[in-house]
Image (cartoon, grey):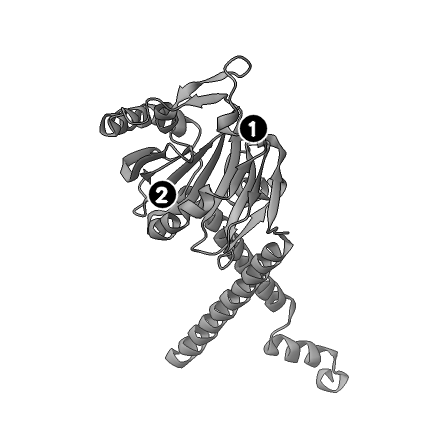
Amino acid sequence: MKRIFSIVLFFVFALVVQGFAQADTSYLRIIDSIEQSFKYQTGQISIPEGKASMLVPKGFRYLDKEQANYVLTDLWGNPKSEGVLGMLVPENVGILDSNAWIFTVSYDEMGYVKDEDANDINYDDLLKEQQDATIEGNAERIKNNYDPITLVGWASPPYYDSNKKVLHWAKELKFGDLTTHTLNYNMRILGRKGIFLINAVADMRELPLIKRNVNAILSSVTFDEGSKYSDFNPELDEVAAYTVGGLVAGKVLAKAGFFVVLAKFWKFILFGLIAFGGFIMKFFKKSEDQPTEATTEQVSSENDPDQNA
């Protein structure tokens, strides 16, 4: 009896291993198929919404608006939004890699952002205000089935370059009970009629790598002639409701960081389990359809006229 049990246990184990192997192969095949479907661009990219162009930095590839929103919404589980105009993806990292990270590119025609207050802002006080605002906003997030956010602190304090008219800062966030914290790295490029918003979607482990690329990313966008910050005409142009300090004080985006990366991979893990479950069902169905050795002998005996004589 023990020997029979051992044999059964061995075959069950072999079945499980084979099932996982087949599910893993299907999973990798699907990921490869999705990765191969993307049409990346390099070189000069026109961004008419912001009356500007982007020279894709070395080491990156660009996905257009349609593909970028497909990644964020369909693959990574974000709420649908038309605000993202494109996405910068590192050359050596795939969209569905476990260590995936990207920069989203957006434009907000909010008007001309005054920068006189840039050197007068107390960013410690601003951080405390944002932490309180984040706590208050969690009720709405939970209502919409999103994890609450904790704003841990500055991952990189705000910095404004008054010569280049660019602003960048980073926040460390915690989503729900996740032990891995999210990096929310924000870059703003000021123009005559609005700003470009370039945000990193990553986790805290990628902070050193992202900081090494900040200057290249900020230098990649060039406003068309007549649309630069220096082209502002106070008699014609609208002034934004936000100053530089107001840009940093903006609400924490609910859809950035490792939260969406985790959602993305749970979706594919689920697919793998479904594939494995399908394999198991097919195996047992096949087993039920095939007669056992004893049944075969019984049927042969019943149909053999010599034995029935």
> Element under label 2?
strand
Asked whether 276 or 29 is in front, the reply is 29
Identify the residue at image location x=65%, y=66%.
289
Q: Residues within 10 Å of mark 1 (few under 14, many from 20)?
A: some
| Residue 91, numbered label | none
2 vs 1, front mark: 1
Q: CA distance from mark 2 to mark 1?
A: 31 Å
Q: Is residue 290 left or right of residue 9?
A: right
- Residue placed furthest toward the right: 305
Q: How many marks?
A: 2
**Residues tagged 2 and 1 counted as in contact (Cβ below 8 A):** no
Image mark for residue 227: 1
Res. 74 in view = no
Q: Would you place residue 184 above or below residue 125 in this image?
A: below
In this view, the residue in front, 168 or 87, is: 168
Question: Which residue is located at x 50 percent, y 56 percent?
Answer: 59
Name the residue type under label 1. Ser
Q: Nearer the viewer, residue 30 or 66?
A: 66
Could you tell me which secondary element the residue under label 1 belongs to?
loop
**Quadrant of the drawing holding the C terminus:** bottom right
Report whether residue 236 is seen: yes
Three-letter amino acid code at the position of disc 2: Leu
Q: State the image quarter where residue 199 is shown.
A: top left
Side of 191 relative to 257 (left or right) = right
State which quarter of the image contains the N terminus: bottom left
**Is 304 drawn above or below residue 110 in the view shown?**
below
Residue indicated by mark 2: 183
Q: Position of residue 290 (x, y in %)?
A: 64, 71
Rendering coords of residue 64 (x, y %): 61, 43
Neighbour class for label 2 at 10 Å: few (<14), some, many (≥20)? many
Coordinates of residue 24 in the picture (x, y in percent):
52, 64
Image: 188 above or below 137: below
